[in-house]
Amino acid sequence: MTSADSTSEVVVRLTDVRKEYGDTTALAGVSLEIRAGEAVAVMGPSGCGKSTMLNMVAGLDRPTSGEVVVHGDDLGRLDETGRALFRRRRIGMIFQFFNLLDDLPALDNVALAAQLVGVPARQARRRALELLDELGIVDRRNIYPAALSGGERQRVAVARALMNRPALLLADEPTGALDSSAGEQVMDLLLDLNQIGQTLLLVTHDERLAHRCASRLVELADGRVAGERSLERAA
Amino acid sequence: MSGLAQPLPSRGRGTGAVWRAARAAVRRRKLQTVVIGLVLLFSAATTVMALGLLVASTAPFDDAFARQRGAHVAAAYDSTLVSEAQLAEAARRPGVEAVAGPFAQAVLEVPLNGPGLTGGPLNVVGRADPAGPVDRVDLWAGRWPRAPGEIVLNDTPPARDLAGFGPERWQPPILGTSAEIPGGPTLTVVGVAYSLGRTADAWVTPEQIQAFRPSSTQVLYRFDSAANDEEIEAGMATVTEGVPADALLAAQSYLLVKQAVAAEPGVFVPFLMVFGILGLVAAVLIVANVVSGAVVSGFRHIGILKALGFTPGQVLAVYLVMVSVPAVVGCALGTVLGNVGAQPLLDISFQGMGFGPVGISPLVSVATLLGMPVVVVLAALVPASRARRLSAVEAISAGSAPRVGRGLRVQRWLSGTRLPRAVSLGLGLPFARPGRTALTISAVLLGVTTVTFATGLTSTVTRYADATDGNDHVGVRAADPERSTLRPASSLTDPQIEALLRSLPGTSRVTVNLTLDFSLVGSAQPVGVNFLRGDIETQGYREQVVEGRWLAGPDEVVAPSELLGERGLAVGDRITMEADGRRSTATIVGETMGGAPGPPGLLADWSAVGRLAPAHQLGNHEVLYQIQLARGTDIPAYTAAVEAADPGLDAWDNGGTDSFTVAAVSLAAVVTLMLGIVTALAVFNTVVLNTRERRRDLGMLKSIGMTPRQVTAMMVTSMAVLGTLGGLLGIPVGIVAHRLVVPIASGAAQIRVPDSLINVWSVPLLGVLALAGAAIAMLGALLPARSAARLPIAEVLHNE
Ligand SMILES: Nc1ncnc2c1ncn2[C@@H]1O[C@H](COP(=O)(O)OP(=O)(O)OP(=O)(O)O)[C@@H](O)[C@H]1O
Ligand SMILES: [Mg+2]
């Protein structure tokens, strides 16, 4: 399948990225490249800077120094609005706690991402429906998040992340709030996505998730890259 | 080490813990605390002003009258028919509370054009001092006469100067002027005093009055009961018993004076009531909104407190303390602000009425200081007791647990519309918290009602002032050769004077008014008829017609309401008048709100002079020329030019701000501003709360690419809906209030208001008002919306 090789285009390039919060150094000079089609898992002890790194890539936060280039955009140079527009076009994000809007049913939560960009409601809903169908939860489309199971909520979140066909899918502990079977389903989903060419960057504590989905493992410790290796994906 | 196992020393019933937790809560909610404080500040200030003005305006006459120990009756006796001893004896009878006098009284003929002392017959009383058991007149400038040749005039003191100069600093220009009394001494004005009961026009020493050959004796009475005409008549019957029947020449009841003097402040009361009620309700509503919002948004915090072992009662206490601290501080500062702010309004409102300094009753401050915190505590109690009942688990999850079933259908429908998503999300926000939304809409509604009412009031008052002030800038009259000592007679005829005035640069319009007295058949008193020609439309009489119509022929007259009421006449009546021994008739075809300058008289067309007074020999000094100047004309220069053109013409500045207009307009402006601020704060608070509750949602929306501008648009839209809704509801309420209150107010002033003064609403004006609600709301929403747009996303998303 489309496992990335060294000839693929570079989607993410971090160059000596540092991030300080007051006295705390969250990232102490991280350099990393991710190529199109790769699935990279970031692991490391709590507080080592994994989420911080992911936020840099998502343009949610700016580095104190160093350069973050994603899909050709130098995020350090973009203003708030520029980074918001960047996220819309290039990035899909999923979180440990799903972050769905409670007032909207599953379908509209998914459609939202496209509507923000200005896609008309009807069209956005059609695409959302397709995605929910592909993710196997189309029958839950009219259910509000409160009444969905954890796994279902995470799949709605994944659908939403995919709405605008992002170049890069970011996931921070996507299975962290799920029980093992729901976690499995999400892992399968991510693996499938990567196998059809979706570039993935996931942060996790979960060895199984990393080994199942990722083609490469980056280990962080104390805000630095402590190790890097390719993974044979478990079947 | 067994220290860990030892129980901590207990601090009684945990008051310390409550206090510490409340202090921490206040510190963590700085913004909320500031908002509560500010809302209370402005609400308390509005309340103090509204209540203060209300209290002051209900009884300024009674208060001032009581301070002066005013005379219930000022009686004049024929000194040849009754002795002073008899009068003193009669005044000792039961029912008489106090008596002053007898004082000798005379009528002086003062030359009309004296340098200071003007105005024909002057009712002078000889009194040794301004004090006494009755009618303690307020000597506000100069001193009391000590020697012959000195006189004190009766006049209203000026308003307290806004800059803080009291009347004691300001010297009226008439002070020190003198006038020669024909066949008498020269009198110098040494002081100006004010008798609210109007017992005399002027006072001199008892020795001086003898020189004027007094014909009557004044006695001033206060009775034990004098609330109405019957009681006053009973009192007079007591004191005149045994006095020869013809001896009582006149008895002036204070009730008549009160009716005349109290009319203007009476106009204010209905306006103040409306403003006061609006202010109070808005304050209460907004306080309830702010406080309950603070409690609801603190549910998670409540859960944590409970998990720590706070009892329900202690949780309740934490929240009450948290809200009360800023509330009490804001309330105290607001009370001060209200007192400071209301004083100038009071001064403007009551200036020139001679009530003396009208202050805000300290009771108002006390009531506000005690009442507002009670309102706050009550408003906090409802949600706080909800918090008290909440279990720890419920409370902790309250912040993040999804709410189901509220306005969801609306959100769903909105997400399918063609609106930009940020806008439709914003439109949906208010449905998530219906209670908070209702309170916010009510606040905006009251704000817009206030703005609408105040706008209507301002238009009405301005139109009233325009109508009654006649728009004249300058009055001109030829000197009367028989009375004037200062001016030569003018050699010009009436038409020549008019032509001269019209030719002067700056003259825009001239109305010519000849007032002649007729005896009215069936009425004891004569009636003045104002014959008008020239630019009569400038006077605005036609717009002031409240019943019937304006003049159309020479046998028609129009009468102001006041005259009709006085003489028991009505529109449609045919009246017979007599002058120079000739009788003629005219029909009253219309009733106007106001009339020509001077005592109320009939209005007629100039062409009626020949019909009603054919034998009259017109003297040029009988004619008044009312002149409207072109915009920008310098009035003193113009009057000087008139007098230079013909020294026989007397020209004067007719201007002078109408204190009522100024007072009403400033009142409306101040109250509108205050309630506008309070309303905007209410919206501000709602957005702050919504933002805080929706931090996670906002973070998510931003993570999927919502730009800061879209976030701001969303939050502002959510409030613009409420603003527009509140605005649309508030306008009709304001209009209805205006329609109800204006007739009540004018009724208090004993005038009938024409429709043109009530129908002040035009489509553009309503359009502007409709925007007012949205504008107030958007203004209040903008700041917190922008800070929501800058919310740091990363923490919110990963941690909550
Ligand atoms: N907004 C912030 N302000 C201050 N310090 C922060 C902030 N965000 C992260 N940090 C600090 O930066 C360091 C790295 O945090 P980060 O969240 O990236 O760790 P992590 O590897 O994701 O940990 P975990 O596995 O527990 O999620 C930590 O020491 C943390 O305390
Ligand atoms: Mg993390």
Image (cartoon, coloured by chain):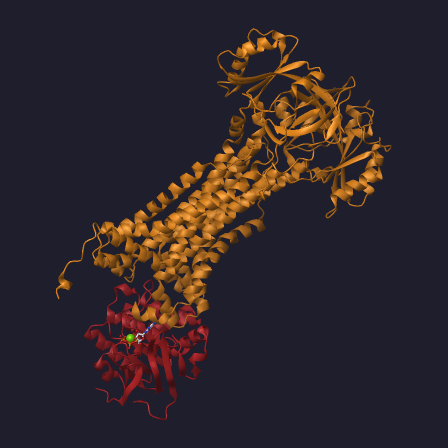
Chain colours: A red, B orange
Q: How many marks?
A: 0
Q: Residue furthest bottom?
A: A7
- The quadrant the C terminus of chain B occupies is bottom left
Query: Where residue B664 sits: x, y (%)?
Result: 57, 41
Instruction: State whether residue A45 appears in this view.
Output: yes
Q: Is residue B300 above or below residue B448?
A: below
- The quadrant the N terminus of chain B occupies is bottom left
Q: Residue at x 15, y 58 (%)?
A: B7
Judge left or right: residue B529 versus residue B163: right
- Give whichever of B556, B540 is nearer the camera: B540
Query: Where residue B751 sits: x, y (%)?
Result: 59, 31
Q: Is residue B283 above or below residue B414?
A: above
Instruction: State whether residue A123 appears in this view.
Output: no
- Image quadrant in which you'd find residue B77: top right
- Give whichever of B512, B106 is nearer the camera: B106
Ligand 2: image quarter:
bottom left
Query: Where residue B237 sits: x, y (%)?
Result: 54, 11
